Image (cartoon, helix red, strand yellow):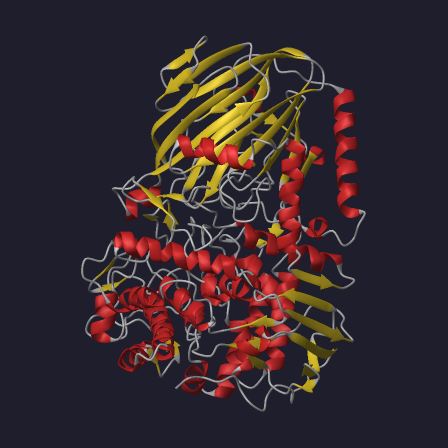
Amino acid sequence: MKIRNSFLQTSLFVLSLGLASCAVTRNEKDVLSYVDPNIGTAHSRWFFYTPAAVPYGMAKLAPSTNGHYGNKDGWEAVGYDTRHNSIEGFVHFHEWQVGGVSFMPTAGELKVKPGELEKSDSGYRSDFDRKNELAQPGYYKVLLDDYKITAELTATKHVGFHRYTFPQNQQSRIILDIGNVQGESGWITDASVRMIDDTHFEGFVHTYPKYVKKYDPEGKVSMYFYGEISRKPLRVGSFSEKGVESASTVAVGKGAGLFLEYETQNQEAIEIKVGLSYTSTQNAKLNLAAEGEKLSFEQAKRQAQKAWREELGKLQVEGPEENNKTKFYTGLYHALLGRGVASDVNGAFPRHDGAIGQLPRDAKGDFSYNFMNTDAIWGGYWNLTQLWTLAYPRHYNDFVHTQLQVYKERGWFGDGIANSNFVSGVGTNMVGLAVAAAYNAGIREYDTELAYKAVYENEMSWKNRKEGSGKMDVKAFVERGYSPFIGGGDTFITDSTGSTFSASHTMEYAYSAYAAAQMAKSMGKTEDYQKLMKYSDGWRHLFNPQSKLIHPKDPKGNFITPFDPYQAWRGFQEGNAIQYTFFVPHNPEGLISAVGREEFNTRLDNIFKESQKNAFGGGKTIDAFAGINAIYNHGNQPNLHISWLFNFSGKPWLTQKWTRAICNEFYGTEGVHGYGYGQDEDQGQLGSWYVMASLGLFDVKGFTDARPIIQIGSPLFDKATITLGNRKKLVIETKNNAADNVYIQSASFNGKPLANSWLYLDEVMAGGKLEFVMGNQPNETWGTMVAPPTVK
């Protein structure tokens, strides 16, 4: 029998939540009070909801409502959903294609399966009430109704901390569920967990995620752990696919797990510390010793929240509208949460071949970078990398170093990376662009010649290219200047002759060729620069002068028929011709000229007027691909720059209008309406976009120019103070700011009038003060004299 009512415990728990909330919100300057991890948790991805973590940590602890279900295609929403009402465990690893090691405190009858989502009695899962749940950056707390157990979680970078407070019971228990699917982990190929002594345990789980199988079939993802429990259990049993052993301290194989049994007194707390690693149990133990051995749960919690305050505090915003601050800091929180460290405290990191790599030390004996796990950077140049450039260059440096390490091992950049395995996701590869942008933005703490070699090969080479590196049609692009359309129906093909997504690939490859060209120019590689710039015009091959749309061509060079510009997945990946026609971020002037300035502005303005009716995405349809057939879809990557194109087309006030509207209407502060309605946040991308747009700063080109620029939108806050990566300060102030005053009337930078709707990035990075006077009517002369420069 599960234990039910305990009025006293519930009352105490609710009181503790109230006190905790007061502690956070009493001081309005406490940035954590503006972060709500539960925003957008309806239909969210596996890596989205991990409150008990530090920025870019390996240990990302979170409750799971349906993680053991896995997902059919390897990427869909799974893990925690605000519409679910039961919890099946607390899982330690949450990355793209990486998930595992679930713990669950229980009581009463022994059950070793989590059970069905809507029927908690079918397994060890428990119902819960969200009024008894608290999620903050670095900390999570919930009352498990079926057991009257309070569960709390926190973390350091490599160590997870649990505290379970039990009622009086002779059948209290902690389940260590190791050998079962969690989230995106895919198939479990092997697992083990064993008690080493009365209070220590260790183990591993080897997984074969769907995208590893598809893109890197010889790879695997392994997770290791070493744990310490504060109280010796009275009894230990094990379970696996073969069944339950009531007196066993070891479990191996699929379904492996242990159950630790206790007799507990009322309000007795049992704590667990778990060191994590992707390389070995020995390194998991080392991580625990280095980061967690001397920490209590409360100390770890304080340390985690201190780290969040420091990182979030690098951007400070002021103004009366509390919802905007919540959107801002929750978006920034997600930007700093995704893409976790994969290296250990001793610099060990996982290699694709199963070996252990070693990070180099600098002259001081320190590791100059972290090795990361990362989802694809597809679209990240319109949000994450810009935010990294401004305030978090160390993260950008880690990203570049990780990609160069993979290049040295594998011969190619990875797109998405899970423990050095290629997990492409989209079959393209924009890593070269992101690395070139880092170089051009002045982030160069790596072997720049090696970086350029990798960037150039990513754009121009195909011999022995691995499928997981993406761009398998780059041969066709290099030979023709565009990728031809092949395949069709339900069959998606990309090979040396072309692609089912040929038009979107052509647009992307032209853009990334431009980025590589600008890196070549900066490094004095003139011949490469000229060659790459020719490929940056690849989009022109597919521009149909009659429709003035991007139109896929077949291998014979003819525009394909029939052709529906609203149709996704035929020539265009996760978008359509209406959306992708604007995918010329590196040459807006060329696109505007090809369409015609007046028609360009009218068409783009009408697109936003129409898409506003559907909240700039898929309306209230809860689905990652909602809006994919629409004329604008803010919930997916291909569109994220186009509201800023009016700065290039002579109508910057429309950029001000529509970016402010997107911030207000696409983004919400609820579980269901957070990032659209159940759309795809992709490890901080949509959150980062809100941060940049609400600051009024953005670059359509993703900082790929040899001398990058940054465009100006509609600053949302009365005042924003950014501690730049070089430790200088940039202050953005608005006068006459209000909900309806979205239009810039005049501006100045460091006391001098600013007439342009753009600045050079190096000017912004020098720090100072941007001041804007806002109004409720457009000033149609401001920002129109000199358009942002376009490299011919």
Q: Of residues 216 and 627, which is closer to you in this image? A: 216
On the question of residue 88 being in view, the answer is no
Q: Specify the farthest residue to the bottom.
A: 785
Q: Specify the farthest residue to the right.
A: 26
Looking at the rendered structure, the number of numbered marks drawn on it comes to 0
Q: Residue at x 57, y 80 (%)?
A: 759
- Where is residue 577? Give x, y as percent: 40, 70
- Where is residue 453? Give x, y as percent: 29, 67
The image quadrant where one finds the N terminus is top right
The image quadrant where one finds the C terminus is bottom left
Residue 50 placement, left or right of 350: right
Question: Dividing the picture into quarters, in which one does residue 204 lie?
Answer: top left
On the question of residue 764 being in view, the answer is yes
Question: Dividing the picture into quarters, in which one does residue 449 lie?
Answer: bottom left
Q: Residue at x 22, y 75 (%)?
A: 480
Q: Of residues 80 and 525, which is closer to you in this image? A: 525
Residue 639 placement, left or right of 544: right
Q: Is residue 607 above or below residue 526?
A: above
- Where is residue 592? Give x, y as percent: 45, 84
Q: Is residue 559 above or below residue 595?
A: above
Q: Residue at x 35, y 53 (%)?
A: 424
- Where is residue 214? Give x, y as percent: 29, 46
Question: Dividing the picture into quarters, in which one does residue 181 lie?
Answer: top left
